Image (spheres, grey):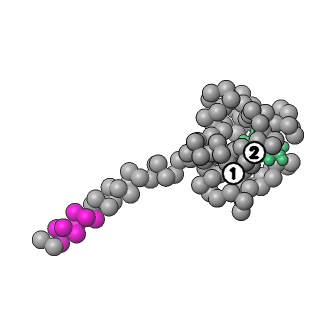
Amino acid sequence: MKRLISLAVLAIALLAVTFARPALAAGDAASGAKVFSANCAACHAGGNNVVMTEKTLKKEALAKFGMNSAEAIITQVTNGKNAMPSFKGRLSDQQIQDVAAYVLSQSEKGW
Ligand code: HEC
């Protein structure tokens, strides 16, 4: 009986982990908005790019430069690129995932 109970507990725990995963792994655009205004808006206000004007965060530009996925944005924010600084150590992995989700959702909405 004891064994049955612990098996049931184990099964429930496994189910909980399985279903909780996608929510944890995906970025949260709402908290990404705060990360964006504090860290990105200086150069990217309104989805623009004040440093390299063609590399905006608009849907067409992201597609053109292969930046229209969470992975690509996470990589660039983490490591930086040319005049864009690296945010490794300044933002947590979760904050970077959140800001990537925010950028993608804003690009869908047209900023
Ligand atoms: C100091 C200015 C600056 C800041 C701050 C900055 N960026 Fe950038 N960003 C750039 C520049 C410059 C580029 C173009 C880099 C290149 O391709 O050479 C760029 C490119 C990008 C691109 C790709 C755009 C495209 O069309 O290819 C994304 C996405 C992006 N930045 C997101 C962010 C996010 C998210 C943040 C905040 C965490 C951020 N940036 C902070 C300057 C900045």
Overall secondary structure of the magenta section? helix
The three-letter code of the residue at mark 1 reads Thr
Q: Position of residue 11 (x, y in %)?
A: 27, 60
Residue 84 appears in the rendering? yes
What residue is shown at x 70% (from left), y 39% (from top)? 67
Residue where numbered disc 1 is placed? 75
Q: Earlier in the sequence, mark 2 or mark 1?
A: 2
Give x and y (percent) for residue 108: 62, 29
Q: Secondary structure at mark 1?
A: helix
* Residue at position x 32%, y 61% in the image: 13
Magenta part of the chain: 3-10
Near mark 2 (Cα within 10 A), the count class, few <14, some 14-19 or many ≥20, is some
Q: Along the horizontal axis of the image, is 35 left or right of 9?
A: right
Q: Residue at x 75, y 32 (%)?
A: 46
Report x, y in % for residue 103. 66, 39
| Above or below, 28 relative to 1 | above
Q: Disc 2 beta carbon < 8 A from ligand 1?
A: yes
- Closer to the camera, 8 or 42? 42
Q: Quadrant of ligand 1?
A: top right
Q: Which image quadrant: the C terminus? A: top right
Please check the rendered image and state whether residue 20 is part of the magenta-colored stretch, yes or no: no
The label on residue 40 is: 2
